[in-house]
Image (cartoon, grey):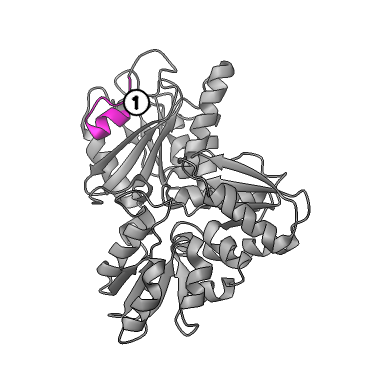
Amino acid sequence: MLNKTPKANRLHIGIFGKRNAGKSSLLNALVNQDVAIVSEIAGTTTDPVEKTMEFLPLGPVVFIDTAGVDDEGDLGAMRVEKTQKVLDRTDIAVIICDFRGWDDFEINLFKEFERRKIPVLAVINKTDEGKISPENLEIIKKYVKEPLETSIKSSREIVFRLKRQLVASVPESFINPPSILGDLVPSGSTVVLVIPIDKEAPKGRIILPQVQTLRDILDNGLKALVVRDTELKDALENLKEKPALVVTDSQAFKEVSEIVDKSIPLTSFSMLFARLKGDLKEFFDGAKAVDNLKDGDKILIAESCSHHQIEDDIARVKIPRWLKNKTGKNLEFVYHSSHDFVEDLSGFALVIHCGACMTNRREILSRIMKAKEANVPITNYGIVIAHCIGILDRAIAPFKV
């Protein structure tokens, strides 16, 4: 039973600032627990600390405490690098400083968030130790309209004041989340979900995108028929009327497309999530780069989480095989599994991303942005598979891209 909101679907709130500004104290105050170590020694937080919780009235969130952006030395540089990578999955940023205000560190942080269109809140901490000067306060107000002044050690009011600002800053997509497929089919219609039970299916469970798609069908007042690929033909013949849509696992695309009449719309879970978590048109356009691949081209296959590799792994066996069959070229494949993305994409001819069920949309959009900045096309598993087997136009048709 999926009775907890997956981390990928939670609002990610990052806390940033210099060493010893009070980031960990702020996190502890917000969650009302000692989840981060607090010390007067600068640089106590060495790795990002995450806390998932229900933060009313926002609902399910992930708070991320980070190392100081002004850390020093070789280890400090590594900590700063980890902090910068948290930016990729931050939906709302909180920049905290002490009564001395902002300088280039905080201003550069703000400008990076502004470039990424991430809302920013500001907290001025340690007001019990000194009062910020009017000049320094005006510097902050040039960037953030209502900075909060407080002493986190002695005031609980900061939680309520910051909560109000967080609520006002929440992106629209979290207040009114988009439907996975409810807008693609008529109300009251039937959707067939094809879920192969193979080596990659977890024992006793179905995978997260399939669970979330089924819930979306129920939320939108649609009817669901869930079958394995081996029972699909009989299931379709037993329906009194044609389904409005068939959704399949991408790995069964070819077999399912041969069973499902061309008059019935067909797509995959991966393509549904390409739209939900990323940019479907960007991924669609990126798949066209497959036709221009040359011998020796490097392909980055990016996974947003690590998992146990199986004998016929989709990323390491099936996709390379489909690409080789499609292009006839000898290609080099590089694999990357992490929240942290590859920094230098300049040597790649194409990026192929997973379905992103275990990460948030902000992180996928950040990866798309990095690929565009490097002028490297990017696509995802389901779209590149559909292209390789020659059914991409059919599979993309339900979205009217």
Residue under the image location 47 percent in, 82 percent down:
261
Q: Is residue 271 visible?
A: yes
Q: Quadrant of the C terminus?
A: bottom right
| Residue 106 as seen in the image, left or right of residue 30 | right
Residue 317: % across, % down:
58, 50
Which secondary structure lies at badge 1?
helix
Judge from the rendering whether residue 14 lies leftward or rightward of residue 25; answer left or right. Answer: right
Q: State the residue in front, 36 or 378.
A: 378
Query: Is 30 contained in the magenta span?
Result: yes
Is 169 positioned to the left or the right of 46 in the image? left
Crowd band around label 1 with a 10 angstrom C-alpha radius: few (<14), some (14–19), many (20+): many
Q: Position of residue 263 (x, y in %)?
A: 47, 85
Q: In this view of the protein, which residue sits in the foreground, 204 or 351? A: 204
Residue 287, image x, y percentages: 63, 62
Residue found 37% across the figure and 27% down from its top: 23
Q: Is residue 334 above or below residue 207?
A: above
Whether residue 161 appears in magenta in the rendering, the answer is: no
Q: Amino acid at mark 1?
A: Ser
Residue 55: where, in percent of width, then height? Answer: 24, 43
Report the residue that reaches farthest toward the top.
41
Query: Which portion, as a residue range, is magenta?
Result: 26-37
Mark 1 lies on residue: 24
- Quadrant position of residue 185: bottom left
Q: Is residue 185 visible?
A: no
Residue at image coords 47%, 30%: 102
Residue at the far right: name it.
295
Q: Quadrant of residue 290?
A: bottom right
Q: Is residue 351 above or below residue 34?
A: below
What is the quadrant of residue 15 in the picture?
top left
Exactly how many numbered labels are in the figure? 1
